[in-house]
Amino acid sequence: MANLDVLAPFIFSFEGVYGNDPIDRGGATKYGVTIATWKRLGYDKDRDGDIDVEDLKLITLDDAKMIMRKNFWNKWQADAIKDQSIANCLVDWVWASGAYGIRIPQVKLGVLADGVVGPKTIAALNKQDPKEFFTWLKERRKLYILRFVQNQPAQKKFLKGWLRRLDGIKYGSLVYNNGKEVRF
């Protein structure tokens, strides 16, 4: 079964320290965790009575991994996915693009495309030929990214990085932002 400990370091290798690029639709972000997500799932780290950007600046990689597990890995019920490569691609898609990373694959799987992963979605996913589904998944995700940038031209500044990260998700390995390849 898939394991978050394989995927998390890969994602964090691409997600930098604190940033607040006005073009980034996520707003203030640290380790890929947006301020909106931290307000919803985090806590008052600086103990000043509110959850705000100052708290986000204080999060650790362990905090970010907790958010990843709670709000992204578990949304895909990835512990029940038999193939690590498929889990990597699916969870990274949800991390980067939200529910589209569930709904689009659900259409391909022939289950209700409601953005909620249940037993039918997992069963259909685990019945797929892993390499064929992985190939489709990467191609479809690339198309999603290209269309997103076409419809949101200001996001083009992130395109090269998004595609490089997607390219780093290989069948049987992950290529980190620094070029290090980890096989599993």
Image: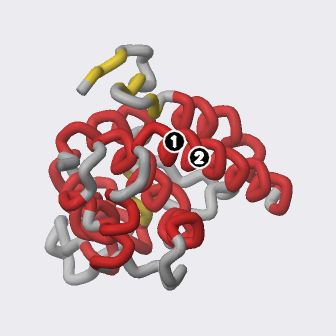
Quarter of the view holding residue 57:
bottom left
Residue 151 horizontal side relative to residue 29, left or right: right
Image: 16 above or below 23: above
In the image shown, does 16 or 86 lie closer to the viewer?
86
Disc 1 or disc 2, which is closer to the eye?
1
Secondary element type, mark 2: helix
Residue located 60% across and 40% down the image: 162
Distance (Cα) linking label 1 and label 2: 6 Å
Q: Residues within 10 Å of mark 2 (few under 14, many from 20)?
A: some
x then y, percent, for residue 174:
37, 28
Question: Tell me, what colour scheme is on the image?
Answer: secondary structure
Judging by the rendered image, the residue that carries numbered circle 1 is 132
The reply, left or right, for residue 136 in relation to residue 84 is right
Callouts 1 and 2 close, C-beta under 8 Å: yes
Q: In which quarter of the image is residue 138?
A: top right
Name the quarter where the C terminus is drawn. Answer: top left
**Helix, strand or loop under label 1:** helix
Of 175 and 59, nearer the camera is 175
Measured from the top left, where is residue 65 in percent x and y? Answer: 22, 53
Image disc number at residue 178: none
- Of residue 15 and residue 92, the one placed in the foreground of this image is 92
- The residue beneath circle 2 is 136
Residue 27: x and y in percent read 55, 63
Please name the residue shown 68% across and 33% down the image. 160
Q: Can residue 88 be seen in this view?
A: yes
- Left or right: where does residue 75 sit relative to residue 60? right
Q: Quadrant of residue 88?
A: top left
Is residue 13 or residue 74 the one in the foreground? 74
The amino acid marked with disc number 1 is Glu
